[in-house]
Amino acid sequence: MTKLAAHDRTRALQLALGCLWLLDALLQIQSFMLGRGFAAMLRATAAGNPPVVAIPITWTAGIVGHHPVVADEIFAAVQLLIGLGIAWRPALRTALAASVAWSVAVWWLGEGLGGLLAGTASPVNGAPGPALLYALLAVLLWPGGPTRRIWPGRTSPRNAQQIWPGRTQPLRIRPVSLTPPNSARVCPRPSAVSGRPRAARVVWLLLWGGLAVLTVRPATSAPRALSGMIAAAAAGQPRWLAGLDDRIAIAVAGRGPVAAVVLSVLLGVIAAGIYWPRRAVPAILVVAMLTAGGIWVAQGLGGMLTGMGTDPASGPLLVLLALTCWPAQQPPEAAPEAATPTASARAAPAASQP
Amino acid sequence: VTGQPLLTGGLAVVMLAMSACCVARLAVGWRAHRPVDRPTDTAHALMGMAMAGMLLPPLRILSLGAWQIVFLLVAAVFLGRVAAGQVAGRRTGGHDLPHVLACAAMLYMLAALHGTGRQPAAVALLLAVALLACVVRATDRISVGPAIGRRAMALLGPQLAACCEIAMGVTMGYMLIAMS
């Protein structure tokens, strides 16, 4: 079963998102975060933002500064529960909804809206903010599929007990990815992404197009901006990563505007590429993943190796987004009736058999 | 392991509870003549005790060097199972490889505490991410696992084993990130 579930792409991506939330939770309880460092980090994001954005940030930073350990452990617990909730199928929808709400709150109060209103946003410093990417991924990975009812003791007690042991009340679930054992013959249930490809493409266009626009703004295209950001990310890193970042910073030093324009064109091509012919889209997504990897290295892997990183930065999330937008496999023509939701719903209980 | 005392103390208690649970599973399985995965439960029990000792030094029952030898042997057992499965054409790697990974993480942490050379932080982070991937996989398995019935069966059920795996993976991930 687990093996079959792992073959379900949407479920695998949901689990990857859950894994990133767990990593976030553990990064949140590093020694640095349990001191005054976390509050100072929050307060710094208020700088340059309009008062309506900055005042709540300062207020939150004040509360966290007064109770750093309790606040930090609450934050970590919430992230841990979101991660485990995404992985535990009965709580998937609740966890994804909580993920959206929490991410938006963190985007505002913890990341200062990614610096978008402060004029400091740049793809190299994590714009538009990793928290916003978590929210987008939670929306795009929202489970699809029909609702079905399982009545323990009547229709399918064994299946209901398997999904929610000890449950005596009717259990209303939406199957997430209970791929039937004979998945080679039965088409997979329409996944969240393949069911909403238009929304995913619009999100992709706005996100990467936005990054392209941000790259030509002064925060990135000023002569020393790009090299300065990369050199700053190298501080406190292990020698191999610091050396790599320093080399990149030296390479773009003095060529900031040119490098910014080249990066902007690349990001623009990635943004528009999602609307190219279907066959070209995987190539564009691979380019996007490589670009995200490059940006991640320039970000110093989000400072995770310095003991001060609160999240893995935007690189892994952009890669996950690219995988989310990967074109769905066309259903085989041999089993057209199995592609309907009704047929999938019929097939799903069989998947619960041990 | 440095960290907030309440947090490290709480995690040490969770690890001791997990260890006790695994020992109880072994005992109940032996008394009731029920099949249990002895190597897995034994490994979890040992890891729980070792991690509790790393989190709270007064709970340390063996020296770091002795624990290193223990986990080298445990890793060898699971690697042997993976190899035997490959030879026999069984695909048991998905079950046994996470235990090999956990043993590698234990050896890394013991080496870091032992002070044998400078441990690369990136390795700790990679191990932590891999363990967290095992945690989400184990959590996913709980929601589609077989039903549990009577208390003895609940103790021997796969849900409890998965809960132990989750608790151990999260604690190990925390310790690795704290050490990185």
Image (cartoon, coloured by chain):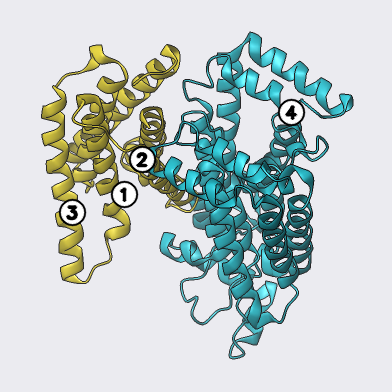
Chain colours: A cyan, B yellow
Circle nearer the viewer, 2 or 1 = 1
Query: In the rendered structure, which amino acid carries the disc numbered 1?
Result: Pro
Q: Are marks 3 and 4 on the same chain?
A: no
Q: Quadrant of the N terminus of chain A?
A: bottom left
Q: Is residue A73 visible?
A: yes
Amino acid at circle 3: Leu
Q: Which amino acid lies under the numbered mark 2 shown in the image of this protein?
A: Glu
Residue A109 is tagged as 4
Q: In the image, are marks 1 and 4 on the same chain? A: no
Q: Which residue is mark 3?
A: B79
Q: If you read the primary sequence from the N terminus, does the residue marked by circle 2 or circle 3 appear first?
A: 3
Camera-nearest label, 2 or 4: 4
Q: Which residue is mark 1?
A: B98
Q: Is residue A190 positioned above or below A109 on the image? A: below
Q: Amino acid at mark 4?
A: Leu
How dense is the environment of label 1, judged by Cα within 10 Å: few (below 14), some, or many (20 and up)? Answer: some
Question: Label 3 marks which chain's residue?
Answer: B
> Which sits earlier in the primary sequence, circle 1 or circle 3?
3
Query: Mark 2 and 1 residues: CB-CB less than 8 Å, in contact?
Result: yes
Question: Residue at the location (50% across, 75% down)?
Answer: A183
Rounded to the nearest angstrom, the CA distance separating label 1 from label 3 is 11 Å
* Image coords of residue A90 (percent x, y): 59, 47
Identify the mark nearer the N-term, 2 or 1.
1
Which of the pair A233/B96 is nearer the observer?
A233
Give residue B35's position: percent from left, percent from top. Answer: 22, 49
